[in-house]
Amino acid sequence: MSSSLARAVTCYLDAQGCGANGLCTTSFDGLNIIRLSEKTPPSGMVYKPSLCITLQGAKAVEFGDAIFEYGAMAFLLVSIEIPALGRVTEASSECPYIGITLDLDAGILREVMSELAQPPVPSNDQGIGVFVADLSEDLTDCIRRLIRLLDNPAALPILWPAIMREICFWLLTGSHADEVCKLVLPDSHMQRVAEAIHLLRANFTKPVRIEHLAAAAGMSLSSFHQYFKTLTSMTPLQYQKQLRLLEARRLMVSEDVNVSHAAFEVGYESPSQFSRDYVRRFGTAPKRDVMELRSFII
């Protein structure tokens, strides 16, 4: 099953004219495929609630202080928006890294959960909203049919919802159902923190007031700090800093913005402080980092 899925994805990428290295967007928003023939330096992004599957090769993703590694036929499930650094750790021209990212639909998850005769009970474990698991045969079959469906644009809008429901069913009845169900529980700590994250992301260039974030989450200051740190592996201020650094990196790499301008653009008042934070996060000075990233892209 695993080899047939990898072959199906490879055939799709080749038919779409996607090269040996790069991201291939699909005809469905929220589904992306990547193929890389070499290891990559750490690349930053904000992960949405999603299913990140590795078919070949291996990957490591760093969320704050937590690092998750997963290889072939395993997936990373992210249940809350978190900035992270990800890198491909295993890839070659003979056996390229192949990965699929599928955004999770909270509405469908909630609908499927409501129809289960025995809905999962959330675990009492208070941990980061991320976990790694092996891809089951049932989920593998769903993903394979999903990829085949991309070749039939007329069928896609009709059959896609059914496949998404099936994917949600297997997630909500699988070995990690007690974690998956936390995505859609009403008034859960995860949902409350997600409200604060939405506010923080919309205003990340501005000075943050923790009191406003706690109020948005409907929590006391102490509870908000506790649950925010638990779910994201960072404090609200660290989260904001990650957003600023990731956006500044994007501006410098993609839009050729200089270091000082990028720093001011994302809310820093001091370019020197920005550079110090940048080195702590990415391990090298901004200019050198940007040059290395551009050479890799080329």
Image (spheres, rainbow, N blue to C red):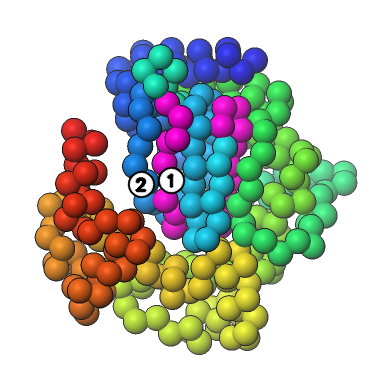
* Residue 20 visible within the image: yes
The residue indicated by pointer 2 is: 43
Q: Label 2 crowding class (10 Å Cα cut-off): few <14, some 14-19, many 20+?
A: some
The amino acid pointed to by label 2 is Ser
Q: Position of residue 293 (x, y in %)?
A: 24, 44
Q: Residue at x 48, y 83 (%)?
A: 210
Residue 86: image tag: 1
Q: Position of residue 118 (x, y in %)?
A: 87, 46
Asked which secondary structure carries label 1, the reply is strand
32 left or right, relative to 282 = right
Asked which secondary structure carries label 2, the reply is strand
* Residue 26 visible within the image: no
Q: Which residues are magenta?
A: 71-91
Rendered position, 265 above or below 2:
below
Rendered position, 279 above or below 254:
below
The amino acid pointed to by label 1 is Gly
Instruction: Give the prevailing secondary structure in the magenta stretch.
Output: strand
Find out whether residue 39 is within the magenta segment.
Answer: no
